[in-house]
Image (cartoon, helix red, strand yellow):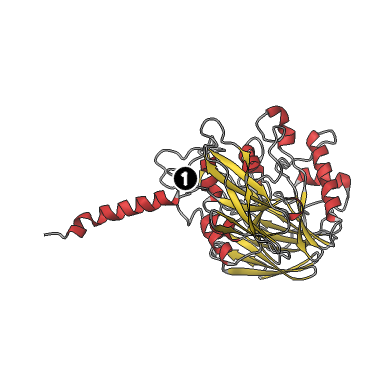
Amino acid sequence: MKSPFRLFGPAIFLMAALLAAFSATPSFAAGPGPAWVELGADGAPIVRTAVGDGQPCPSLSVRLRLRSRHHLPMSLRAPSASGASFDISVCEARLPRSARQVWLAGVRLPLPPRTMRRLVVIGDTGCRLKASANGGVFQACNDPNDYPFAQVAKAAAAWKPDLVIHVGDYLYRESPCPAGNTGCAGSPSGDRWASWRADFFDPAAPLLRTAALVAARGNHEDCARAGSGYRRLLDIAALSPSTDCHDPANRLDGDTSAPFAVPLGHDTQLVVFDSAAAGNKPLAADDPLMVRLQATYAAITSLSAKAGHTILVDHHPWLAYAAGTSKSGQPTLYGGNAALISAFASKSPALAPPSADMILSGHVHVFEAVSFKTDLPVQIVAGFSGTDEDKVPLPTSPPMDLDPAPGAKVDQLASWIDGFGFLTLTRTGAAHWRMEVRDRFGKPLQTCQIIGRRLACTPDRIAAHSD
Ligand SMILES: [Fe+2]
């Protein structure tokens, strides 16, 4: 006679698995949902959380310097939307700089230290679900080997950063998973809360519990794609009808934002700007976007003058390479970003403010670091944290026939192609950072020293598929 376990064991296992699956995705109608701390203008911390439809915003418990705890009510940032797209409300509280500790529902949230020396950089983290005339691309969101952002976030949290920088492109689940595709079966899609939760807030949870976030905006978050969700959830500015991406007449306002600075301590800062609408074509002088990006350049120049050392943060690299395949099937190398270069060069031939030592970007789905013989910042690309990777190799040495920008002569070029991971940056001197390129489990593969505008990586290239 078979034992009861042999008869019912598989069913019990299945029920346990189902219960685990459901408990991992609670409706949180009875309490707060994901909570995170973002840094806004001048590094001021903003606490946000999502609550179930109809739930009131909770209160925080905050301890200020030399003071006892007090309650700080969160205010409603974005009410739940009619229909099913955003069936949650977003609540927020802007903390005074004197805040030292903060709790939500008994859980302590991470506030940044006054001096931030340990930075994690991630980018391009969503699971690509995109239909097209030739079938499209459907990453296996359910398979951590194919879509490893949760592993990346867990490993990055274990490194215990002072701050997490996301260089943009959070939401890639644009098209419904095709029937019968088990790799992505059950995934939500479109710019709605369920997609944002699956693509960012759930996998990023360990990281968001560990450190505050600086969130740059990607082209996946422009108004034509997930801009509405970005404005609700991640934008640091107040939600406004002129910028919330709802009215197509406000598209230009919706697609652009004011840059902001985040002090890291000791005469060093981040300057973050919105390049979501940049595209990749040079802009005409009378293009309204040209005027906006010229204003962006003026603003980042002004902000950059407030510290001796600045790290620029945006989504589109303008001093890096991307490799792809031409229509005839030939490997093709591209350089720079024509839209940003046209706007920035019209303001200054230097293409970056004088205090900018480094640019942190994403968009290209690789790790890449570029430095120059000419006087330009080191360009870093960290678009390798979850979205399907670019697989055409970058050159092993600086190409002689293609500069990323006019006159930008490349000195060092380091890369890692077709591997998932994240960057860690540790500040070791006034303008000195040690950068480690890590795989999805946190193992360091390359170490780069960045001193001012100089770069040296060892080794300068990692073989493909080494993760
Ligand atoms: Fe992008």
Using the image, determine if residue 194 lies above or below residue 19: above
Q: Is residue 318 left or right of residue 161?
A: right
Residue occupying image coordinates x 88% and y 50%: 349
**Residue on which disc 1 sits:** 30
Q: Is residue 459 left or right of residue 290?
A: left
- Looking at the image, can residue 274 be seen? yes
- Looking at the image, can residue 166 be seen? no
Using the image, determine if residue 26 lies above or below residue 248: below
**To which quarter of the image does residue 433 belong?**
bottom right
x and y, in percent, of residue 30 in the image: 47, 45
Q: Is residue 118 left or right of residue 149?
A: right
x and y, in percent, of residue 5 in the image: 21, 59
Q: Nearer the viewer, residue 13 or 39?
A: 39
SS state under label 1: loop
Residue occupying image coordinates x 68% and y 46%: 217
> Disc 1 marks which amino acid?
Ala
x and y, in percent, of residue 309 in the image: 82, 62
Using the image, determine if residue 70 lies above or below residue 128: below
Q: Nearer the viewer, residue 340 or 69?
A: 69
